[in-house]
Amino acid sequence: MSHSFPSCPGRLGLYPVVDSLEWIARLLDAGVRTIQLRIKDRPAAEVEPVIEQAIALGRQYQARLFINDYWQLAIKHGAWGVHLGQEDLDVADLDAIRRAGLRLGLSTHDDSEIDRALAAQPSYIALGHVFPTQTKEMPSAPQGLEQLKKHVARLGSMPTVAIGGISLERAPAVLACGVGSIAVVSAITQADDWRAATAALLALAGTGDEADA
Ligand SMILES: Cc1ncc(COP(=O)(O)OP(=O)(O)O)c(N)n1
Ligand SMILES: Cc1ncsc1CCOP(=O)(O)O
Ligand SMILES: [Mg+2]
């Protein structure tokens, strides 16, 4: 029988998704407390030192650092959590992640993927992509705000994260759908002034350290 994964705050707040140690360090220093290291398709031996140092930094700042994809390395080095996609569910050892005490976030794009994610009893469910995105090639259409609102309502007390095309300008409308967190890549990493963008997004979404209401 499966059991649920360790819990997350109901509202994870601003959740930057970045691909380097440099971004992890500067965003933690800027006050971000929920963050993901997302390095795609590199050999494990190459990413292991980066993952290890990112986890150490996350601990130093008492932050919630999620590792995307590399779940074995996340377990080995004691990450706060792991983020996995639907395809990863076919191959990842969820029991091993749970036994190691790591939180689990799962990607979803529609109701049937939400069904599948709920069965795994994860720590949060990500809902995407909300708007068109240049950052990742997506096989499905953007779900838009109405669908996002329906999914958030369906998920009740399950912590939720919205992702995909969320800019500073769009963030208030996304948060108004009731989602507990906004995950962003380009809104920060492509901003003319990443510090100002991060501060403005933190002011809107919070850090995730706020007490659950
Ligand atoms: C918070 C968050 N939501 C969704 C994703 C996408 O994850 P996944 O479906 O595994 O795709 P890749 O990021 O691995 O390309 C995410 N990383 N983070
Ligand atoms: C990793 C990922 N998964 C769904 S959309 C996305 C990319 C989001 O990037 P951006 O915030 O730049 O649209
Ligand atoms: Mg992934």
Image (spheres, rainbow, N blue to C red):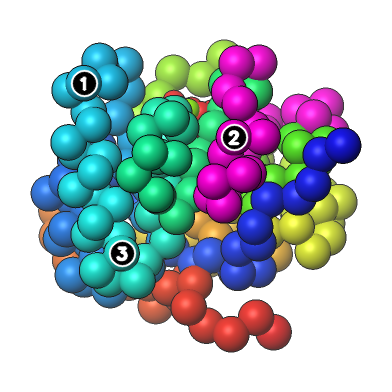
Location of residue 52 in the rendering, given as x and y in whole percent from the top left corner: 24, 43
Q: Are marks 3 and 1 in contact (CB under 8 Å)?
A: no
Q: Are marks 1 and 2 in contact (CB under 8 Å)?
A: no
Q: Nearer the viewer, residue 139 or 212?
A: 212
Task: Give the residue at mark 1.
Answer: 45
Q: Earlier in the sequence, mark 2 or mark 3?
A: 3
Residue found at x 65% / y 62%: 7
Indicate yes or no: mark 3 CB to ligand 1 under 8 Å: no
Which disc, if any, is residue 96? Answer: 2
Label 3 – label 1 distance at C-alpha? 22 Å
Q: Secondary structure at mark 1?
A: helix
Residue found at x 30% / y 60%: 58
Residue 189 shown in magenta: no
Q: Earlier in the sequence, mark 3 or mark 1?
A: 1
Classify residue 158 as left or right of residue 48.
right
Q: Nearer the viewer, residue 84 or 110?
A: 84
Quadrant assignment, res 130 = top right
Residue found at x 40% / y 50%: 79
Residue 150 against residue 86 in the figure, above or below: below
Image quarter where the N terminus lies is top right
Classify residue 33 as left or right of residue 158.
left
Q: Earlier in the sequence, mark 1 or mark 2?
A: 1
Q: Secondary structure at mark 2?
A: helix
Label 2 – label 3 distance at C-alpha? 21 Å
Q: Secondary structure at mark 3?
A: helix
Magenta residues span: 90-116
Residue 109 against residue 206 in the figure, above or below: above
Residue 176 against residue 108 in the figure, above or below: below
In the rendered structure, which amino acid carries the disc numbered 3? Arg
Q: For the residues carrying marks 2 and 3, which lies nearer the camera in this image?
A: 2
Task: Give the residue at mark 3.
Answer: 59
